[in-house]
Image (cartoon, coloured by chain):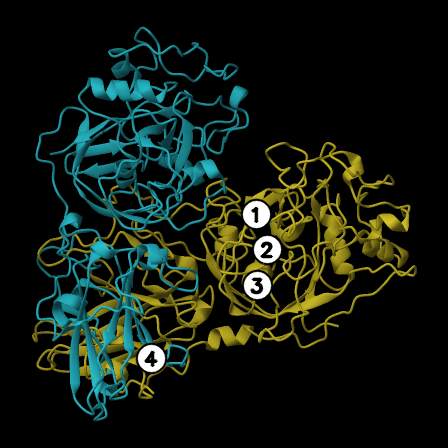
Chain colours: A yellow, B cyan
Amino acid sequence: MWPSKSVCALVGAVVLGPACEGSPAPLPPLGEVLVVADTDLSAPRLVNHLRVDLYSADGSSWYESREIDRSHPGDWPATFAVALTDGEADRVALVRLRAYAAGFVRDYRGERFLPRSPGSTSTLPAQPSTPFATACAECPREVDDQGNDRTPSSEPLPGVTVDRLVLVHVRPGALGAARVVLRGACLGNMADLSGLRTCVDTDSVLVDESEESLDPDLTVTAPSQLLGAFEAQYAQACTATPRAGTTAPDGTPLHDEDVCVPGGVFVFGSWDYFGTGPLTDDVPQRLAALPPFFMGKYEVTVGQWRAALAEGFTSPDSSPDDNQAALPTSSIPETDPTVCTWTSVPRPAAERRDEYPLSCVSWAAARAFCQRLGGDLPTEAQWEYAATATAGRPKSRYPWGGPAATPPTCARVVYGRGSLPSIDDLCNLDGGSFGALPVDAVDYDGGDRSPPLGLDGGDVTSFLVDLGGNLAEWTRDAEASFASPCWLGAPLVSPLCDVPPPASRVLRGGHWAAYDLTVSAAVRVPLDPTLLGHSAGLRCVRPAGGS
Amino acid sequence: MSTRGAGRPTVWLLAAAAACSQEATPLPATAQVLLHVDTDAPLPGGASGSPNALFDRLRVTFIPPDPSTPCGGCTQDFALTTALLSSRLLSVGAPLPPGQAGWLAHVQMYPQAFASALGDPDPDTTVDVTASIPPLADTGVVDLTLLLSTADVGQPVGTAAAPVQPVAGTVTTSQVGSWAPAKPTPCTQSARTGEVCVPGGAFWMGTSLPVNPPHAAIAYLHPRLVTLSPFFLGATEVTVAAFRKFASPQQQWTGSMSGASSLDWCTFTATPGALDDHPINCIVWDLARGYCRSIGADLPTEAQWEYAAGGLVGSFFVWGTDLPQCGDGVWGKGGAGYFGYLVNTCTPPARPTEAPAAFVDGGHGLDKLSLDGGTIYDLAGNVSEWTLDAWDSPDGPCWGTAKVYTDPVCGDVASATYRAVRGGGWYLNGNELPAVTRTQVFGDRYSVTDGFRCARPGM
């Protein structure tokens, strides 16, 4: 029933809309350059705000800062004018464009430029190149022509921002257009304001900004034809078929099927667990792009390990610990050797021991197991993406999805089954519900299952089990702050922070002895890779195009 | 690097949209309702010295007579700015079918910060008006005006069954920013030594973040619009030296810093000593309040405390949004001896755990709030602080209702059993430093972690 025009047209003749604030000033004799900023990211999911800052040509004086809401797909390309206030002389102005999502900001404490440093193995939080004082006395300030300090108190968080510098030349009496595409490939590449260097279209590559040649054509084609193209490159299904589940010779299900996790772009990191330690903070957030991959539907089981040994696989070390005794049925100390699930001598079938997830395994042994299958341990980014944000859904706190934080319950998640009163025994108050469970224990609708993973949501059988509980899972990445050069230098596509041993490795996901908070999917728990965690196991990933 | 003075090029930037003006086509000659929206609320982009912006988004939904009819494009979101209302005025056009009765306009003004992950407004923080639209004639524009009153926040005005009637006509002068309780109000008395005037104003108290960790005794308040009269607040937590003039608590420093005893970190000494500049701790609520009353003041209310700790603008930390680093304040220094289970993020492993650090200007990093009358220290860290209010859960009788709270103080202050202790401390982790952090504590309990500061009315 509405006119087919975009929001602008709907309200155009009558006023505004987010894209229609203000109106161009009277044109010549004063000069004006129309800046047309388009993006290949998706709006509003990944970008919905444009921060525009105007500086003198060398970046030393800061004239204006505007925050422009561009939440509707129809708001792109975003346009605005850089105009002369007198008609006397040519001016070259430096325009800084930052496309980002609302709410992802940090405090402005002066320019905190950090170049991307791919391959860095430094794991401690990076220091800004310019030390900042509390009062920011030496920072660039935005001062208006009445002398009022209008410096904004915050700036877009670099990891989720495309940050682009453009030099525009404004001539008296002349009109021109400068066209800029804010490319997803430049996400996380902060512009170097003092060096006038900026990412144009390649991750980790900054180029010298030269003066934009102006386009006499003032036509603006809306809506954007580029919007979403970056994400579409990655939001692909697997090209091969997932592996079907198999059984052991005695008929025991091995739970070794895997499922396709379609690719996508997501916000990696969250505030869920901030401040609890300098190395495991899951902030600052960044956008990460992931191609599709296959992931084990269940955690690797005792039976899978046994089958691999039968096929000639050997562990690179003495792990996993061998516990030939029955698993405890009531509370005992959590690090008792009989808590480990692996047994080299099969237990009676009634105990279903081979369907328990494999624990007390080193990082190296876990990784060797996955590599044997042509795969690897998941990266932290792959794990968090699979658990929170597949197929463009709003990021969830827990792996079972939903934008609201629906906390774990004892029926849903294998957690709170420890033996420490008031700490991790929430689901074991009578002492009779201790330890891990077979991997299919919560594999039911409403259990610890991810939402269906398919891009169209069509395949309801494609989901992951026990990301919330049972065992925490080894990932490939080293223990490192998200603010460290190792992470800041990690690529946008398939980011990874890989520091040679003996660096600790990160476990993801809750486990049988977890409490509510640590079931949260963004929580990162580092562990020495040689330690055999009683609540740590693994699941594998493999390339989506592989067999 | 000031830009004031000679040589400033005259270049400006317009948030103009040529795309819109070029695309604007004459509307079809159908009937149209033009809904004008105005508000008294302060919005982003106000002049220097204007009140805190309280809302930044507007959602307008036109609801057909049969609400089950799909209505494509019937919901529009707008980013609100002062300039939008004051210079251009905000109006939304809708070419509704002529002659149809029963159309409604549902208008919601809200802060984006508290919206859901899907972008939907949080009803508690929304000014929500449902208005009826009279049947339109075949052609022509019908101007209707709705005023969104800040005072109605959280209390929807009109329903689908009983909508309000918009005023006919257009807005000529916007009321944006005129809501009096939000205006910064200076103290009218003069400050005494050691206190700083916190000007009155309005802010969002509480947060929509999940409690971290989820725990009934650390229950963040839901977002609430609070207005406060100006008040004076102690520049520092009350020190051992200051407290000694008033009383001697039973719990005194053992003289040891080993942490072997739970009293090792109580700071009080009967005679002047090494910890005189440290905040007093190990005192119960009655004693803390008694001290404040003895100097003609009282404990701050939870609202006063959070207003100051959020930098008067409702920010996450007193300094803004950056996560705390160890040098930013006094925190993360527990974790040894009797308190081995506490947090030691910021204690170098080779050193003994520190007691609450002395008040040394510059030593507390970013944990300071600079106002016209002076600087207030240690709201985020050092010791956690008693407040005046009785404890109430976020959904309880004091804080459970969405409305405007004016100088709120919860419950029977004199006789309550539980109190709200506010702020992070030397023994806590970074995730407990935000201004919204509140912990339920038994009023007769004393702890090495808890001290206080005083407040009194500013007018």
Quadrant position of residue A82: bottom left
* Three-letter amino acid code of the residue under disc 4: Pro
User: Residue A332 placed where, x, y %?
Assistant: 74, 32
The residue where tag 1 is placed is A524
Disc 2 chain ID: A
Say if B71 sits above or below B137 in the image: above
The residue where tag 3 is placed is A494
Q: Residue furthest front?
A: B161
Q: Find the distance from the CA under tag 2 to the CA under tag 3.
A: 10 Å
The residue where tag 2 is placed is A380
> Which residue is more in the foreground, A509 or B19?
A509
Mark 3 or mark 2, which is nearer the start of the sequence?
2
The residue where tag 4 is placed is B64
Q: Nearer the viewer, mark 4 or mark 2?
A: 4
Q: Residue furthest top?
A: B271
> Which residue is more in the foreground, A365 or B306?
B306
